[in-house]
Amino acid sequence: MENFSEIKKTKIFAEISENDMQAMAYCLKIKFANYNKNDTIVSQGTPAENVYLILKGGAKVENIDSRGDISIITKLKAGGVFGIESSYSGEEEYSEYLIATENSLVMIMNRHRLINPCQNKCKRHDIVVKNLVKLIVERNAELIEKLRLLSKKNTREKVLAYLYRQSSLAGSVYFDIPYNKTELANYLSVDRSALSTVLSKLKEEGIIDFDKKHYHIDINRTDISK
Amino acid sequence: MENFSEIKKTKIFAEISENDMQAMAYCLKIKFANYNKNDTIVSQGTPAENVYLILKGGAKVENIDSRGDISIITKLKAGGVFGIESSYSGEEEYSEYLIATENSLVMIMNRHRLINPCQNKCKRHDIVVKNLVKLIVERNAELIEKLRLLSKKNTREKVLAYLYRQSSLAGSVYFDIPYNKTELANYLSVDRSALSTVLSKLKEEGIIDFDKKHYHIDINRTDISK
DNA sequence: TAAATTGTGTTGTTTTTACAACATTTTGAG
DNA sequence: CTCAAAATGTTGTAAAAACAACACAATTTA
């Protein structure tokens, strides 16, 4: 089957055999599409009909508010899914943009078919649904984590909380983050130059060190664990 | 069955008959507990074993960070559920507080039993699971909504976006919000007195009006819809 | 590889916020 | 109904952030 090796690598289809996938492909009205870096895969405000699974490359989920301010919701790597929540909620329009951050291969599925298992042909469909729920819960946890960051009352605390968290996830005080400075500012919803100032200050104080997207943090001095 | 009339009113058990509920009660190890206003129902950091369903009264979900700052995550009314996400994610400790905001009756269920339908006795369990997923997705949408608020770059915009949203939900420019000023400040993660100043300014400008928890907003002047 | 674009750090200015302190008002318990 | 506690609005001050403008570095891409 076309692109099956990539499909197999994703969390939501990991347990599905090529044969079962074949059957499901028809049922889910699967299509494949290639996008170039910076292509808009989905536009905020357009009718929500599909679920997008990144097979190769990567994409970012952004929201642009009425004033034109951009806020990066999250970044998706291969295996990442866009549009499930709106599928379950029944939302009629996408409320975010999905933009390719690299040249990407994307699998497009009909959202209605995806979340409503047909008992006959797609016998493994229920497993996929279970995986989708798991994914939603994970996303939920991410959102709460981000809320925790944005609830901090100044940029310094947001940055430290973010880096501390990334360090924990990486299991090391040396780690890479997925954002450059401009993107990090968007992610934390702070002014880029203000972020730059704070980062410089923290570096000067010896609490953190960084180069490009690589960071080092002196855990004992973050005042976060106290 | 004990408290069945209240259980019946909740979203997650709405379709369940008294007989089926009876069977399920045993399976889910259901217990009931009464709490007084301001009682802590669940403490952040304690082992997560149960899911809590508010049957009567209400509760708030709070997070306290390392600096002691309180952030209200959300408020739960009767029918509200606490602890599902951590059940699905397998998180071992509760990461929030659940605190009664009124005298409340709470149904406590074993989280493992709840999310893993036993096919034999609880024949309607799968419906409950489906309802739980729906609930998680709804919560997810709420979280994104809140993120959108916290991403605004100053208090005035946060307040206006919040009130605009509440007005939309209520379907009227006259509406009540569930928070008093102090709680609203926590919810929006801003200083209480700063919030008070902004609210006074907006009232003076005639853009909003309010009394206690009742608000009026002049939609045409919020600059949000532009 | 050269040119154009994007990313980064810095600085000064203006605006907004947090903080603290206080006076009233409102609420709730007894 | 009374009194204590909690909520609210206000103000001044200090700290922080947004904003804008700029120089330079790094990265794309033509």
Image (cartoon, coloured by chain):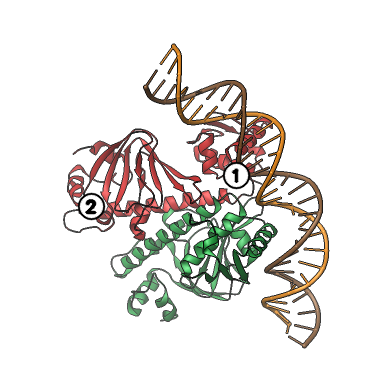
Chain colours: A red, B green, C orange, D brown
Q: Is residue C10 above or below residue B100?
A: above
Upstream in sequence: badge 2 or badge 1: 2
Q: Chain of mark 2?
A: A
- On the image, the x and y values in percent for residue B213 come to 60, 71
- Residue A124 tag number: 2
Q: Are marks 2 and 1 in contact (CB under 8 Å)?
A: no
Q: Secondary structure at mark 1?
A: helix
Q: Secondary structure at mark 2?
A: loop
Residue at image location 62% in from the left, 68% down from the top: B180
- Mark 2 or mark 1, whichever is nearer to me: 1
Residue A209 at least partly seen: yes
Mark 2 Cα-neighbour bin, 10 Å: few <14, some 14–19, many ≥20: many
User: What's the amino acid at mark 1?
Assistant: Lys
Whole-number angstrom distance, CA of label 2 to CA of label 1? 43 Å
Q: How many marks?
A: 2
Task: Please name whichever residue, D12 or A211, is drawn nearer the observer in this view of the structure.
Answer: D12
Residue A171 at least partly seen: no
- On the image, the x and y values in percent for residue B122 come to 32, 70
On the image, numbered disc 1 is attached to which residue?
A: A158
Residue at image location 36% in from the left, 59% down from the top: A91
